[in-house]
Image (cartoon, rainbow, N blue to C red):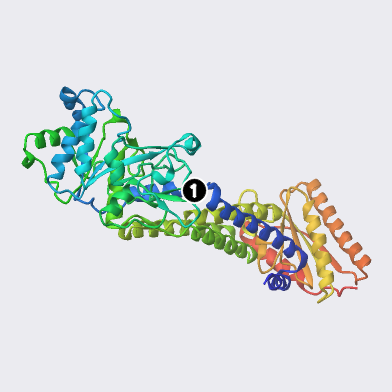
Amino acid sequence: MMHEILEFLNRRVGGRLAQRSLYVYIGLAILCSAFAFVDTQYTGLVNVTETKIYDLLIRSRVFTKKPDPAIVIIDIDEGSLQEMAKQAGRWPWPNHIFAELLTKIEQQAPTAVVFDILFSDADKNHPDSDAALNAAVEKSRTAFFPMVRLASENDAKSRIKTAWLPGAERLPAVASADTTIAVILPQIPAALDSARMGFLNVTPDKDGVLRRYPTYLDHDGWRFDSYGARVARQTGSAPPSTPQFLLNWHGGAFSYTYLSFKDVYAALGAQGANVIPSFKDKIVIIGSTAPALFDIKATPVATMYPGVEILATAIDNLKQKNPIRILPNFVPPLIGILFIWLVTYGFFRNIPADKINLLFSASQFGFIATSYIVLSLFDFYIDLSAAITYGLIYFTAAKLYSGWHRRHLASLDRLLKGPDACKFAHLTTIRLPAGDQQAADIAELCLLNWLETAPPNTRVYLPGEFASYSLDILIASQIVLIVFSATEADGESSDTVRKLQQLCQTVETQFQRAGLPLPYFAARKLQLPEAEKALEYLRSEIQSCQMPQKEPT
């Protein structure tokens, strides 16, 4: 395939200069393709832009599914902390408070009672209170309790065997029964016996925003459900097989049904359950939105989002089987690499840079619009911003190289019009032996080297199919080189003529060394008329240069 491309370029634009550009563009394409792969799999540098776009789209959705009315949050809010302090003291409250609440709620036949509270310490001042909660949990068939995974560097210090944890699933890989794990467990023996437990840990992205919820946690050949996944599994909803999923938010904070803890406790304690909604067939989550208890996190839909509602959202997503679905991880880099090589082809075909730039802008807008519509209607996030960014990185690098490579070229319109229009043009014709590819290659290399040292105040135009967009337009029979003087300064004009003479001498010398027939040279200096007539005048002069004046000798 590469050989065919080279052959095509050789036929179309002539020899070694095209090959040199080819190698540079391909080298840049390979580097950018490698970056796309490494960034997607390891560094995630472009992912920052991707997540910001996602946040904007998820906040701006026109159609947002309503939260499940069967999920109710009993909120330990600031009012509850103040009111309950009169009978239970300051937080943390004695555990008999939660024992009473659990017993009363279970009398209404809920689906689950989910505590978003860590019972990590025994109440040494109220041992009877701990016993009351343990007794209530022992009778319960719906109570769930969280555990927390600590940093892995603490595993060696832990005395808790991984195999001992409730709900531990042994993976097919070899798992050691003696490995330990650092974890905070509830100090409720009945909760450990029930195995209705899961890890409460969630991990925000690098920017501190929580967008994903874990499905499971693996440790040394053992797998454990996350807290939300355990609740979903025990209540009849199988969690996905992926290690995590994008949360499908149902609006801003406080979108679910909230009941103040103090109101529920007072109503149930006074046998006044009729003043609050029934908990029958409900998933009741007991947690806190009080800022004093520090369970607040940043999410795409709110910078301060209650942790208890994140848990509610995760359970809701798993119950309804509607987390945000995404493309497989390998798709964005593949599309990005495709963009890179399409742009590479565009540079070879001399498509103007402004058209490629317009294509990027249009594709970015099109993909964002498509992503927004699909996300709103189908809970599916199609994100190709990273792929476009990878292509844009390549386009920028290739454009910089192209600008350096063609820095002496300028369009006729810019040269002939405006306040800085050129007044003089030097036309030099180099007629080569017809059909001699070696002669064309030699002349081409001489021209390339000459352009490296061309007068800084001159611009070069090579007429041909691609006009000023590319150097690679030499033909095997004739080169028409037009050098524009930027000003009327005699010194500059003389220097330009001298440089052109050096070019002709170099070509002649190289032809002599190769034993080729010498080319024919013709040179003229033109004073250009006004801008409106300059282009037509110059075209006629180019045509006269291209007419056979003398056969090469």
**Image-quadrant location for residue 327:** bottom left
Q: Is residue 60 visible?
A: no
Q: Nearer the viewer, residue 511 or 268?
A: 268
| Percent x, y of residue 395 | 59, 55
Q: Residue furthest front?
A: 178
**Image-quadrant location for residue 161:** top left
Q: Left of 525 or right of it: where is 535? A: left
Residue under numbered circle 1: 176
Q: Nearer the viewer, residue 41 or 230?
A: 230
User: Label 1: how many residues lie within 10 Å, few (<14), some (14-19) or many (20+)?
Assistant: some
Quadrant for the N terminus in the image: bottom right
Q: Left of 39 or right of it: where is 104? A: left
Q: Is residue 395 visible?
A: yes
Q: What type is the residue that disc 1 sits on?
A: Ser
| Percent x, y of residue 346 | 60, 64
**Image-quadrant location for residue 480:** bottom right
How many numbered dots are placed on residues in this image?
1
Q: Residue at x 68, y 64 (%)?
A: 537
Q: Residue at x 28, y 37 (%)?
A: 188
| Percent x, y of residue 198 | 34, 45
From this view, report whether residue 324 is shown above or below residue 478: above
Q: Nearer the viewer, residue 550 or 255?
A: 255
- Label 1: which secondary element: loop
| Percent x, y of residue 510 | 89, 63
